[in-house]
Image (cartoon, rainbow, N blue to C red):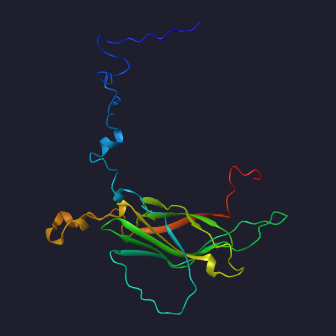
Amino acid sequence: MIPLLLLLAAPGSDPFGPPLGAPDFSGRPLTPPVPATSTWDRMFPTGHCAGPALQPFQKQPRVCPVAVCTCDSEASGATKGLTWVKEFHSAAHVPYPRYDLNGCPVEGDGLVIYEGMRFHVDPKSGNYDLTFTATVPAMPVLLRLQLTLTSSDGKEEYKLTLPMIRMEPPRDAKPGDPAPRTFHVAHRGYSSLFVDPKQAIPPKQWDRQTATLKAKIDDKWVITRTGTARFGTPVAIEDPNR
């Protein structure tokens, strides 16, 4: 026995929505109704999505192979707009997990991030730049990094998660040659926690209240880093030999 569904509607109303309009016998196709504005468009009256300053980052990190030094002097000017810098004075190492037949770990080359990783912040725009140099073993490496920012009194803590960074040496690299396995990595991101509100106010208009404004995170905070790495090319799901 098939149940019947009874639709109730007020007199003069159509439960399936308004009609498409009067029929047109001229042979021209009927014009479909214009859909109502979506909820997403109502959030942004101009019809555009959120501005770029509201996104955590706009582009993937730039990963460039390090060329062999030509012994030419290179001019290194100061970067404009970067007002405070944190530098990691120690290297970081992610070991490549390998084991012998007895299950004992075997030491070998892994991912090395050299001393001098720098974290630059521009309080006026909220942009930050993270740059470092790394060497990988003779295989692709997928690096995940996260920065932890802690207030000077240790009561507040925030985290910045970077997009995945892939470093892949060329297939024709010579064995034992570190040049094609070494990369300069640069990533630019944004966080409203770095924005100093008084930077948008001309200094001539500052008052006592303006002087008290400051960014949530400034150069007094302590920055630490954590990361993991995946070595080798991941096996595709559709690979029958996986």
Q: Which residue lies furthest to the right in this view?
A: 101
80 vs 117, nearest the viewer: 80
Taking the spot 32% from the left edge, 33% from the top edge, the residue there is 34
x then y, percent, for residue 26? 31, 25
Question: Quadrant location of the N terminus?
Answer: top right
Taking the spot 48% from the left edge, 73% from the top edge, the residue there is 131
x then y, percent, for residue 97? 72, 65
Is residue 114 at all visible to an observer of this figure?
Answer: yes
Answer above or below: position of 135 versus 21. Answer: below
**Which image quarter: residue 31?**
top left
238 left or right of 127? right
Taking the spot 67% from the left edge, 62% from the top edge, the residue there is 233
140 vs 220, nearest the viewer: 140
x then y, percent, for residue 44? 30, 46
18 vs 189, nearest the viewer: 18
4 vs 100, nearest the viewer: 4
**Which image quarter: residue 119?**
bottom left
239 left or right of 4? right
Q: Residue furthest front?
A: 26
Is residue 219 at all visible to an observer of this figure?
Answer: no
x then y, percent, for residue 118? 46, 75
Answer above or below: position of 169 versus 233. Answer: below
